[in-house]
Amino acid sequence: MASRSKKYYDGNPQAKAKKNAYNKKYNALPEQRSNRASRNFARRTLERIGLVKKGDGKDVDHKDGNPKNNSRANLRVVTKSANRGRKL
């Protein structure tokens, strides 16, 4: 079964072209892929020790803003709004 987003982009070629251009320009860059992998690793680490759960509405924040620094002392659990509204 096709997802809602796939149906949307299949029915809207302009939106699909815009999304593909953005993905090629930003998401596919090696540095961004590496940063995303590091952020996912931080989340999995805190899931393993029981501080966060999948779907709990919380984000794992890197206190120093560096997604590569996954030391436990640098990670904290915050609300999505607090983490995403934070200025570095």
Image: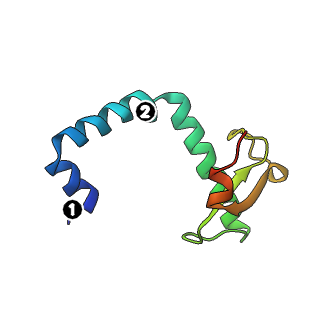
Q: Distance between the residues labelled 1 and 2?
A: 23 Å
Residue 30 - label: none
Q: What residue type is labelled 2?
A: Ala
The quarter of the image holding the N terminus is bottom left
Residue 65 locus on image (x, y percent): 73, 40
Q: Residue 7: name its quadrant.
A: bottom left
| Residue at 68% across, 66% down | 48
- Location of residue 50 in the rendering, given as x and y in whole percent from the top left corner: 71, 71
Horizontal side of residue 9 vs 46, given as left or right: left
- Mark 2 lies on a secondary structure that is loop
Q: How many neighbours does mark 1 have within 10 angstroms: few (below 14), some (14-19), or many (20 or more)?
A: few
Q: Which amino acid, by three-letter code, is at mark 1?
A: Ala
Left or right of 15 on screen, residue 45: right
Asked if labels 2 and 1 touch by Cβ distance under 8 angstroms, the answer is: no
Residue named by callout 1:
2
Looking at the image, which residue is at 69% across and 38% down?
Answer: 68
Relative side of 42 to 6, left or right: right
Q: Which mark is residue 28?
A: 2
Q: Which of marks 1 and 2 is nearer the N terminus?
A: 1
Q: Tell me the element at label 1.
A: loop
Q: Is residue 52 above or below residue 32?
A: below
Q: Position of residue 88 (x, y in %)?
A: 73, 39
Q: Which residue appears at 21% of the width and 62% of the height?
A: 2
Measured as percent of width and height from the top left, residue 45 is found at 69, 58
